[in-house]
Image (tube, rainbow, N blue to C red):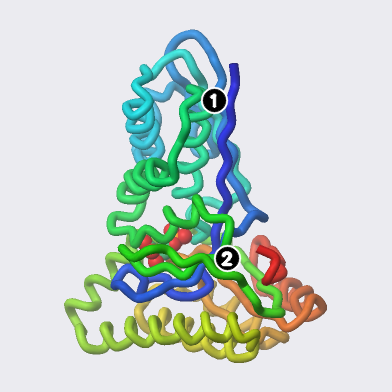
Amino acid sequence: MKATGTANGKIILMGEHSVVYGEPAVAIPFPATSIETTIKKITGPVTLDCFFYHGPFSQAPERLLNVTTVIMKTLEKLQQPLENFSITIKSTIPAERGMGSSAAVAAATIRALFNYFKKELTTACLMELTDISEKIAHGNPSGLDTAMTSSQSPLFFIKGQPIIPFSLNVSAYLVVADTGVTGQTKEAVNSIALLSQRSPEKTTAAIHTLGKLTRQAKLAIEQNRPADLGVYMNEAHHLLDFLGVSNKELNQLVAAALATDALGAKLTGGGRGGCMIALADNKTSADRISAALLKAGAVNTWIHKMGED
Ligand code: PMV
């Protein structure tokens, strides 16, 4: 007996961090990267096999607490014991790089367990369980990553409000580049919380402006104005840098993209490492930007045609 579950990576186009404070975010599913979890029947204690660990489930390290907890909670829901199966998690989403790998691991694993035990999984249940994992991984998640794991289309997301799917009606290419440096979402989210205690006015103003830029970016997408979208991305990157969630590697890649053909560039996700995105007018520019990013130190790049989500 065997069953699988999958989930995509995601890219935040605009609104990371400010989304935690009730401002909107725009995110897209990123099927170029994904997770597949496989559950297989074995006899005896459960085993876990993933990038960070291979061995008995009961001895999994602390850093996998989000994964082990969500597995226990899912089994509770399914009213099944923790025995007689193996769990294998395969991922092409670079971990801790702002592509939502923790939420995707949770979603793929929940789906696999529900499939294995032949129980129907509602979206509400998937989101409730994924959120448990995200709270452990990120501390104070906005819920955006959780929402993206069950979405096939781009989302306009405001914490606690109904999610609005929309189409990326913009003729442009997105180049995604991985700095190769582990991002620090939890630390970055906490650092903005600390900054807002030290300089409340400046921090609040930056967060509001990020929200305004996200709304303007959504309009630019809907009205197919890629050049304006690029300008909003640049402004968002400066504000995120001001808030302390960029770093040297991200700033170098943003500069390299802008020095090539990019209409705009910014970090994506939690920051302090992880990935950045650049907007290109056409495929030739996207290829040139990708080459420039690799030359500037990116360990990997992906090119995504917008409007094909
Ligand atoms: O780093 P990621 O992919 O988990 O994205 C985090 C996005 C934040 O806005 C920084 C945090 C959140 O909970 O929305």
Residue at (56% x, 36% y) in the render: 5
Residue at (49% x, 18% y) in the render: 85
Q: Would you call the spot at circle 2 few (<14 residues within 10 Å), some (14-19), or many (20 or more)?
A: many
Q: Is residue 175 left or right of residue 6?
A: right
Q: Where is ligand 1, by quadrant?
A: bottom left
Q: Residue furthest left?
A: 197
Q: Nearer the viewer, residue 89 or 165?
A: 165
Residue 285, located in which quarter of the rendered image? Answer: bottom right
Q: Amino acid at mark 1?
A: Ile
Q: Residue furthest top?
A: 43
Residue at (38% x, 84% y) in the render: 242
Q: Classify mark 1: helix, strand or loop.
A: strand
Residue at numbered disc 2: 179
Residue 272 in view of the camera: no
Residue 159, located in which quarter of the rendered image? Answer: bottom left
Q: Is residue 65 left or right of residue 108?
A: left
Q: Nearer the viewer, residue 57 or 223?
A: 223
Q: Would you call the spot at circle 1 few (<14 residues within 10 Å), some (14-19), or many (20 or more)?
A: many
Q: Classify mark 2: helix, strand or loop.
A: loop
13 w.r.t. 6: above or below:
below
The disc placed on residue 188 is: none
- The x, y position of residue 209, in whole percent, is 37, 87
Location of the C terminus by quadrant is bottom right
- The x, y position of residue 262, in whole percent, is 67, 84
- The x, y position of residue 23, in whole percent, is 35, 76
213 w.r.t. 177: above or below:
below
305 w.r.t. 200: above or below:
above
The disc placed on residue 39 is: 1
